[in-house]
Amino acid sequence: MTSRLVVIPTRRAHSNHAEVARSIGIDIIAGRYAEGGRLPGDAELTAMFGVSRPVLRESVKTLVAKGLLTTKARVGTVVRERGAWNMFDADVLAWHLDAGIDRRFLNDLAEIRLAVEPRAAALAAVRRSEADIAELNRSMERMRREASDSVGFADGDLALHLAVANASGNLFMRSIGNVIEAALRASFLLSAPIETQDRETVLLWHQRIVDAIASGDAEAATAAMTEVIHNGLRRHEDVSPSSGAAPAVSAVVEPGEQS
């Protein structure tokens, strides 16, 4: 695939070892360290980052746990094949956005969402509690009162989707939250629904998700969730990486900071 990349930066990490892990992780994902290749030695890396060996080792442990690296006796630290990476990990997803995403990555995110979220919505329609409905309504209210290109609108959107996953009562569906977050952040920064018609469409279909779950209509909930995901893809087609257009990044949504 030859489409251009769009970079969607996240905020820097809060500790030395986390920042080193982030920097190496982005370099791996961007292909600056090739799959199957070795990282530079400890001496070179500690000098490069200006950190101690214990900090470097902690960073490597983090990347090993996320599936990006493996350590081998008498070989060193080796980059693992892409298929071994934990793509559901919040950091790994965020680092992909930092490294630069293309249309394939956006489509992959949409496909996994389509495989899970419509079913989660159907289950939520059957299993939801009054507390779940209240949370869905709160999220919907926040989307309505916030500007379409604001962090608050994105927070409300994310909160609604996570509330649906939570209301499904399925622990595995709840764990897809990192994927939902990455997809929504990419979509929001590429093409927030600023135009009046886009905003109304987004609000209409999200409200239909809430209404269907509240009324116990699993079929309608499935259809509404499917339409929301497809609409998000359609909305940023004209500014997606393959078009060569760059997003106007007015805000950075950091993983784990949404309310």
Image (spheres, rainbow, N blue to C red):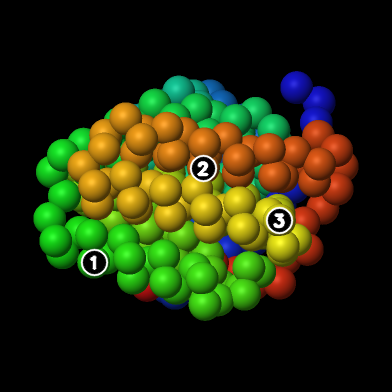
The tag earlier along the polypeptide, 1 or 3, is 1
- CB atoms of marks 1 and 2 within 8 Å: no
Residue type (three-letter) at the residue carrying disc 1 = Ala
Quarter occupied by residue 139: bottom left
- Choose the circle earlier in sequence order: 1 or 2: 1
Task: Tell me the residue at 20%/59% (across/down).
Answer: 132
At horizontal 49% and vertical 68% (from top left) the residue drawn is 143
Q: Residues within 10 Å of mark 1 (few under 14, many from 20)?
A: some
Image quadrant in which the N terminus is located: top right
- Judged left or right of residue 232, residue 117 is left
Q: Is residue 203 visible?
A: yes
For label 2, the crowd category at 10 Å Cα-Cα, with few meaning under 14, some 14 to 19 and many 20 or more, is many
Give the structural element (helix, strand or loop) at label 3. Answer: helix
Q: Residue furthest front?
A: 215
Residue 222, x across and y down, in percent: 36, 33
Q: According to the image, label 2 marks what residue?
A: 228
How far apart marks 1 and 3 lie (CA) works out to: 27 Å
In the rendered view, does 244 fall on the left or right side of 204? right
For the residue pair 187 and 92, the one nearer the viewer reads as 187
Which residue is tagged 3?
197
Above or below, 19 relative to 109: below
**Disc 2 secondary structure class:** helix
Using the image, determine if residue 143 lies above or below residue 221: below
Give the label on residue 134, or none: 1
Task: Name the quadrant containing residue 171.
Answer: top left
What is the secondary structure assignment of the residue under circle 1? helix
Number of residue marks: 3
- Nearer-the-camera pick, 182 or 148: 148
* Percent coordinates x, y for residue 108 in the rendering: 54, 29
Above-or-below relation of 29 to 81: below
Circle nearer the N terminus (2, 3): 3
